[in-house]
Image (tube, rainbow, N blue to C red):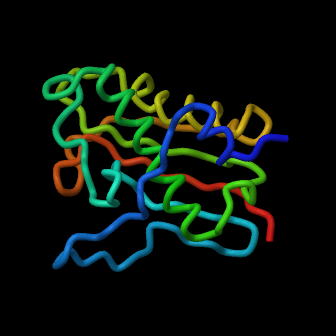
Amino acid sequence: MQTPEERLDELGLVLPKPVEVPAGLHLPFTFINVRGDRLAFSGHPKQSQDGAIAGPFGELGSDLSTEEGYAAARDVALSVLANMKAEIGELSRVTGWVRVFGMVNSAPGYTEQHLVINGFSDLIVEVFGKDIGRHARSAIGTAGLPLGFAMEIEGEVLIRP
């Protein structure tokens, strides 16, 4: 059976380096929190290949299109996977995706948050397969997000020891 890392290679996708929190930014939490057989990941933006926080910034429906948001949500998935891998070593330790919660900074009247967060969900299912990758999910619109992010995605997975 193919590992998630092998599947990423097959898809031609490269994980960025783990997140580098900018100097002076106080974050009294961790991006990845492991408790027993559960791993919770905090709201993630996307990261550049060097691990720097890279947005996207702005509002969906005014600054970014749904298609641009979908592509960015796929990049957020890669950032989440990079940070998970840095914490647990191998992505094959993930035995099931439990839930995903997508928050989309939305212009007034914008109603395609679910289509944006599909970018994240589609990538997870592509990498992990339907059995492990399927998850419960919510996608909501917000009037703003920290640092002007266009989206943040958080969730929870099950892992083996």
Depth check, front residue: 143 or 46: 46
The image quadrant where one finds the N terminus is: top right
**Numbered disc total:** 0
User: In the rendered image, which quarter is residue 112 located in?
Assistant: top left
Percent position of residue 113, x then y: 37, 28
Left or right side of 148 for 68: right
Q: Is residue 39 above or below residue 94?
A: below
Residue drawn at the location 28% of the way across and 60% of the way down: 52
In the rendered image, which quarter is residue 42 located in?
bottom left
In the image as oriented, which residue stretches furthest toward the right? 1
Q: Is residue 8 left or right of residue 3?
A: left
Q: Relative to residue 82, is residue 58 depicted above or below?
A: above
Residue 129 location (% of width, % of height): 73, 34
Question: Dividing the image into 4 quarters, which one contains the C terminus?
Answer: bottom right
Q: Image point 43% across, 22% down: which residue?
A: 115
Residue at 32% from the left image edge and 68% from the top image edge? 20
Q: Residue at x 43, y 41 (%)?
A: 102
In this view, 29 is above or below 44: below
Q: Quadrant of residue 132?
A: top right
| Residue 118 image offset from top left, x and y in percent | 49, 27
Q: Is residue 33 above or below residue 133?
A: below
Give percent across and percent down for residue 25.
20, 74
